[in-house]
Image: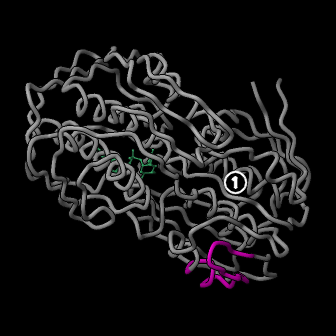
Amino acid sequence: MKILEITGGQKLSGTIRISGAKNSAVALIPAAILADTETTICNIPEITDTDNLCSILSHLGVSTKRASESIIIDSSNMKNEEIGEEFSKKLRASYYFMGALLGKYKKAVMYFPGGCSIGARPIDLHLKGFEALGAKIKIDANKYTVEAEKLVGCPIYLDIASVGATINIMLAAVKAEGKTTIDNAAKEPEIVNVATFLNNMGAHITGAGTSTIKIEGVTHLHGCFHEVIPDRIEAGTYTIIGALCGENLKIDNIIPEHLESLISKLQEIGTKLEIGSDYIKISKNEKYKPTNIKTATYPGFPTDLQQPFSILLTQCNGKSKIEETIWENRFMHIPYLCQMGADITVKNQTATFIGPTKLKGKEVVATDLRAGASLVAASLIAEGTTMITNVEHILRGYENIVEKLTKVGAKIKSREI
Ligand code: UD1
């Protein structure tokens, strides 16, 4: 088992370069199989989620070549095999193979996806979308068979603006006959990144980034070159760390517009920020004002940054609140923060913070990816040493976290026990 040992109290300065977005890359890799020829995707983060998707590609007979931050995917010898549970359960985004295989072969057989236990995480909206396009769905325990004689474009309304369902329906609909409209689509930047990739392959998608996406089906998609956008959640996490213990810490290679809701909350509590065209420079303030946060779909405050931001709220003067509206189970890091000295109570989907409180190093568990990242942030300002177990969750989503933090002055070590 891997653990992280972090000794808090260091001032962090220098530059952290942000990697490609996990939530884009995990959709772009399955999307690449829709092309009949070779695609190259650059700025792919080296995280276990992308490694696990490459294992699925190799199981399907798709060749992949990694060259530094790029991946070349060639599906010309691909076979439409069943994707077993040993592959699907490794990550949530394995479900994008359902839409991509359905779009390419009109058939996908795979098991229910895995991923962080942050809520029930149903896939009913994905399946409803596939059915609307003409697919029949058979569910046998955890095994899903999704099959269509032909896929025909149609209007689809999503009851919830789901990121996964929006992307999965796009993947299935790009080669359907005629026009598909997705209403109440999710608007996250990762969706725009995937739609651009598909358009570069020859698809006709308009409206990505708005709540109505229109897709005109095509018969063939070809290889292309594409770039993953910077990871706004990784960028946000390090920006929050900068507000906790930074001294002119530069968060580089980012798209600041993707972080507007975070930036406005940081400004509201009194953070010192310099915002450039592709970077943010941030320093710790001596005193922070309290604030209230309610998570929402993009461009609202991202649920994925709620947990890292909670560490800042333990340092604000007075009473702050976070209301989590997307996932039922996203306060699992709070008991550990309380053990470290924070004053937080959770009732239903709202956490109330009384600050500021001094944090002390303890033994804590990363229960999920962003909970783990928030415990890293807490450890960096805690007195003494914190030991974080279940680090595998963090490595699924943060490329070279130990190296990136060490480079700016953190005392962080990873070791096997
Ligand atoms: C994606 C992100 C995740 C982020 C989340 C919300 C990826 C790989 N993961 O997850 O980091 O926290 O968006 O921004 O991109 N829902 C249903 N039925 C469905 C699908 C979703 O009820 O078929 C509900 C979910 O339970 C949740 C809400 O819709 O309450 C949003 O989920 P969704 O946007 O689909 O999240 P993911 O795509 O899984």
Q: Is residue 160 above or below residue 65?
A: below
Q: Residue 232, relative to residue 80: is it above or below?
A: below
Answer yes or no: disc 1 within 8 Å of ligand 1.
no
Q: Is residue 209 left or right of residue 92?
A: left
- In the visual, does 13 lie left or right of 399? right
Residue at the spot of label 1:
338
Q: Residue at x 80, y 59 (%)?
A: 359
Residue 57, position as x, y percentages in the image: 46, 24
Residue at the location (83% across, 45% down)? 386
Quadrant position of the C terminus in the picture: top right
The amino acid at mark 1 is: Cys
> Where is residue 251 drawn, in percent x and y?
71, 67
**Image location of residue 107, percent across then percent down:** 21, 23
What span is in magenta? 264-281
Residue 197 drawn in magenta: no
Give the percent coordinates (x, y) of residue 151: 11, 35
- Looking at this view, is 296 or 150 the one in front? 150
> Image quarter for residue 103?
top left
Q: Is residue 113 left or right of residue 334?
A: left
The N terminus sits in image quarter = top right
- Image quadrant where residue 368 sits: top right
Residue 30 or residue 395, whichever sits in front: 30
Give the total of numbered labels.
1
Instruction: Work out whether 184 lies above or below 45.
Output: below
In the picture, measured across the screen, residue 196 lies left or right of residue 215, that is right
State the residue in front, 409 or 141: 409
Residue at 28% in and 50% down: 166
Secondary element under disc 1, as helix, strand or loop, is helix
Q: Residue at x 25, y 56 (%)?
A: 205
